[in-house]
Image (cartoon, rainbow, N blue to C red):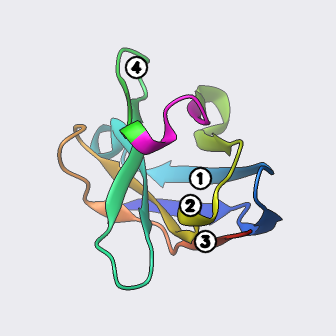
Amino acid sequence: QVQLVESGGGLVQAGGSLRLSCAASGRTFSRNAMGWFRQAPGKERELVAALMWSGDYTYYRDSVKGRFTISRDNAKNTVYLQMNSLKPEDTAVYYCAAGSNQHVYDYWGQGTQVTVSS
């Protein structure tokens, strides 16, 4: 099993910044890849950013490139999502996820709300 605990969501004005954290524990080989997803009301869940713990892969969806940064702290088994220049359209519940590879995510955190006011 893999356990994921998220923190760092909240309410921020447009143009502001937030940093999300995801602390991972459990079976290491089941969480080679870590991703941040988000789901806005009435919309499908979408992958925002992802990385491999090995450091040889990162992904960003086009709408967040240049504004969001995904990073990891191997010693703390923690993945971060630094979100800058936030826009109202970034408002969503953000989920941390883990998988054995970057295409399939099997484990999910509880979600954290990010609200960006205009």
- Using the image, tell me which numbered label, if any, was put on residue 90: 2
Mark nearest the camera among 4 and 2 is 2
Q: Position of residue 32 (x, y in %)?
A: 33, 35
Q: Are marks 3 and 2 in contact (CB under 8 Å)?
A: no
Q: Amino acid at mark 1?
A: Cys
Q: Name the outermost residue toward the front.
A: 118
- Using the image, tell me which numbered label, if any, was put on residue 54: 4
Mark nearest the camera among 2 and 1 is 2
At a point 35% along the width and 85% down the height, the residue shown is 42
Question: Count of labels shown?
Answer: 4
Dividing the picture into quadrants, the one containing residue 103 is: top left
Which mark is first along the chain, 2 or 4? 4
| Residue of label 3 | 112
Q: Position of residue 31 (x, y in %)?
A: 35, 44
- Residue 68 is covered by the magenta coloring: yes
Q: Amino acid at mark 2?
A: Asp
Dividing the picture into quadrants, the one containing residue 55 is: top left
Q: Is residue 87 left or right of residue 18?
A: left
- Using the image, tell me which numbered label, if any, was put on residue 22: 1
Name the element at disc 3. Answer: strand
Mark 3 burial class by Cα count in 10 Å: few <14, some 14-19, many 20+: many
Q: Position of residue 89 (x, y in %)?
A: 54, 63
Distance, label 3 to label 2, CA atoms, is: 13 Å
Distance, label 3 to label 1, CA atoms, is: 10 Å
Compare residues 37 and 118 and report the one nearer the observer. Answer: 118
